[in-house]
Image (cartoon, grey):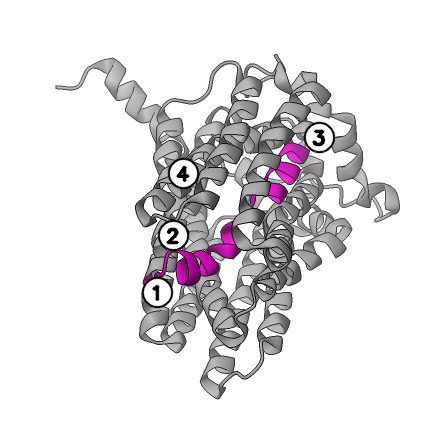
Amino acid sequence: MTTASETTAEGERFAAFRHGPFLRYWLARFFGTFATQIVSVSVGWQIYDLTRNPLDLGYVGLVQFAPALLLVLVTGAVSDRFGRRKVMGLSTLLEAACAAALLALTVHGLVSPLPIFATLLVFGIARAFFGPAAASLVANLVPAEDFANAVAWNSSAWQTATIVGPVAGGLLYGLNAEIAYGTATVLMLAAAVLVFSIPKPAQAKEQAEPTSLQTLFAGFRYIWSEKIVLGAISLDLFAVLLSGAVALLPVYARDILHLGPWGLGLLRSAPGIGAIVVAVWLAGHPIRDHAGYILLFFVALFGAVTVVFGLSTITWLSIVALALLGATDMVSVYVRETLIQLWTPDRVRGRVNAVNMVFVGASNELGEFRAGLMAHAFGTVSAVVFGGVGAIAVAGIWAVLFPALRKVRRLDGRV
């Protein structure tokens, strides 16, 4: 028999799923991320097969990041003004169209990566609008007291997809590239249907206020004035910008660990395995104190395990290091996203998240470009190790530059 305390703990663990719209949102994020992972593995392997140049893997990240940077003043304002559910759904449909375009290009045969880069540019535009809308929508689907739980489960959807998606992508691409891209297209269409099935949520809007530079820059102004949010966002930017090594996994899979497409999928899924374990743990055991110190510690640990991965030439050790990398990153994601969403007024949440997505994009896509460029110039192992050491240094510097972030204790209030 279960005790009353066990029943209460179980209820707290699944608190976000008491709200039906969040369940649909969660499934949509899972399907969409699963499809994106299939596309990512397939594109990486396809381009490296075409060119055998690590720098081209860096360009994959750059062309997807550029739209988020160039459209940062537009994407968040659009989600705040026209409805986050609508923007999220339309963006997902555009992603599905891009997956279908990659399918068509593959069927007709590729002799150059340029058509893939062009398609990924459009995919990046879709992601630029998708990111702020999706991140902001969660706060409109669950009450504040269940939001931290929703963040943990939302991250688990993403991480679960990153576990299964890369493996599935590697297996599907190994069978047939057309099957991989076709599967991704269907999953993205399913995600779009789920998004549009969510009942229209309440959202604070400023429809009466005309669009101006002041309204467009509202997200930047808020972040600059709220040093804890600024510190959390910029910490992720510089730490992952320096330490990101995911773009170089095709090189590790083929040339260092001597694995095939399935092995690449396994490497890509390893960070998700560590992250999902931590996400499920955090759903039932939320961080209740010393959140700032925990954030900085795990960012430094993230850098340390990146160094271990960079130096490893043993498959099992590389997989373990990547799993730990995902686990440590999950803690920082949980703290950072909860802080940003709960401490931001709803009327500007889309614009704040647009800025946050640029920082996240810079730390991921632009970080991939940094890794590819350094690997091209100095070697793959040197590029990864340098980035890991850089992430450790960033954690220490940010502890000094942002004392308010370091001293944050609870995530549900400014104490």
Q: Which residue is mark 3?
A: 230
Query: Residue sitting at 56 percent across and 14 percent down?
Result: 409
Give whichever of discs 3 and 4 has the lower sequence position. Answer: 3
Q: Which residue is mark 4?
A: 275
Crowd tier of the residue under label 3, counting other residues whose Cα lies within 10 Å: few below 14, some 14–19, many 20 or above: some
Crowd tier of the residue under label 4, counting other residues whose Cα lies within 10 Å: few below 14, some 14–19, many 20 or above: many
For the residues labelled 2 and 1, the Cα–Cα distance comes to 11 Å
Q: Residue furthest right?
A: 213
Are the residues tagged 2 and 1 within 8 Å (C-beta)? no
For the residues labelled 1 and 4, the Cα–Cα distance comes to 24 Å
For the residues labelled 4 and 2, the Cα–Cα distance comes to 14 Å
The numbered mark at residue 267 is: 2
Residue type beneath disc 2: Leu
The relative height of residue 345 versus residue 197 in the rendered view (above or below) is above
Residue 313 point in image, percent of width and height: 39, 49
Label 2 element class: helix
Give whichever of discs 1 and 4 has the lower sequence position. Answer: 1
Residue type beneath disc 4: Ala
Check residue 261 for magenta coloring: yes
Give whichever of discs 1 and 3 has the lower sequence position. Answer: 3
Label 4 element class: helix
Give whichever of discs 4 and 2 has the lower sequence position. Answer: 2
Residue 206 point in image, percent of width and height: 75, 41
Check residue 104 for magenta coloring: no
Q: Which residue is mark 1?
A: 260
For the residues labelled 2 and 3, the Cα–Cα distance comes to 32 Å
Crowd tier of the residue under label 1, counting other residues whose Cα lies within 10 Å: few below 14, some 14–19, many 20 or above: some
What stretch of residues is rendered in magenta?
A: 233-262
- Name the foreground residue: 108 vs 78: 108
Q: Nearer the viewer, mark 2 or mark 3?
A: 2
Give whichever of discs 2 and 3 has the lower sequence position. Answer: 3
